[in-house]
Image: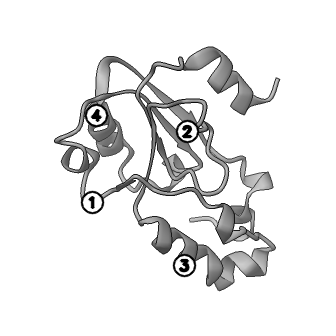
Amino acid sequence: MDFRRHIVTDLIKKKDRIIEFGPLDRPIVNKKEYKNAYYADIRDTEGVKELYSSNEYLKSTGVAIDTETIVDIDYVIKGTYEQTFHKEKKFDVAILSHVIEHMPDIIAFFKDISSILTKDGKLILIYPDSRYSFDHYRVGT
């Protein structure tokens, strides 16, 4: 079974309040199917589209994103997750697909993300296999 399908079939429920970070053009959860799903990014929708329409590094790796298929962002992350969502109801599920590898302080990330999840909330992380990622072309640190 496709791992993305496994997430929506086995790990989350239709009634869950879900926040998906960095959905780009292929979110894990579809808002038509999951009425309590929201998308978040460090840029607003127009900022994400601009980044992917003018990113020469991505173009040089052969990665192409049709900016018309990028989903609308509901929340722009400003500061920490706790700061961004302090007035919002907590989420049952947080999904980060190909986002965790960009976190500069992984311990701070886990502490921060836990502040926006319910007591029994789920954190679903999907991270890229560098063999199949545009990061494959980057020099390691």
Q: Give the residue type at disc 4.
A: Ile
Q: Secondary structure at mark 1?
A: loop
Q: Give the residue type at disc 1.
A: Lys
Neighbourhood count class around disc 1 (C-alpha, 10 Å): few under 14, some 14–19, many 20 upward: few
Q: Quadrant of the C terminus?
A: bottom right
Neighbourhood count class around disc 3 (C-alpha, 10 Å): few under 14, some 14–19, many 20 upward: few
1 or 2: mark nearer the eye: 2
Of residues 110 and 81, the one nearer the viewer is 81
Label 4 and label 3: CA atoms lie apart by 28 Å
Reading the chain from its start, which is encountered first: label 1 or label 2? 2
Instruction: Residue under label 2, please give it.
Output: 31
Count of numbered badges drawn on the protein: 4
Of residues 105 and 97, the one nearer the viewer is 97
Left or right: 41 in relation to 77: right
Q: Give the residue type at disc 3.
A: Glu
Q: Which mark is residue 50?
A: 3
Neighbourhood count class around disc 4 (C-alpha, 10 Å): few under 14, some 14–19, many 20 upward: many
Indicate the position of residue 119 as horizontal and vertical percent values.
28, 16
Indicate the position of residue 133 as horizontal and vertical percent values.
74, 57
Q: Residue at x 46, y 19 (%)?
A: 15
Left or right: 2 in relation to 141: right
Instruction: Residue under label 1, please give it.
Output: 78
Colour convention = one colour
Label 2 and label 4: CA atoms lie apart by 20 Å
Q: Secondary structure at mark 3?
A: helix
3 or 1: mark nearer the eye: 3
Q: Residue at x 34, y 43 (%)?
A: 109
Label 1 and label 2: CA atoms lie apart by 23 Å
Q: Secondary structure at mark 2?
A: loop
4 or 3: mark nearer the eye: 3
Of residues 33 and 40, the one nearer the viewer is 33
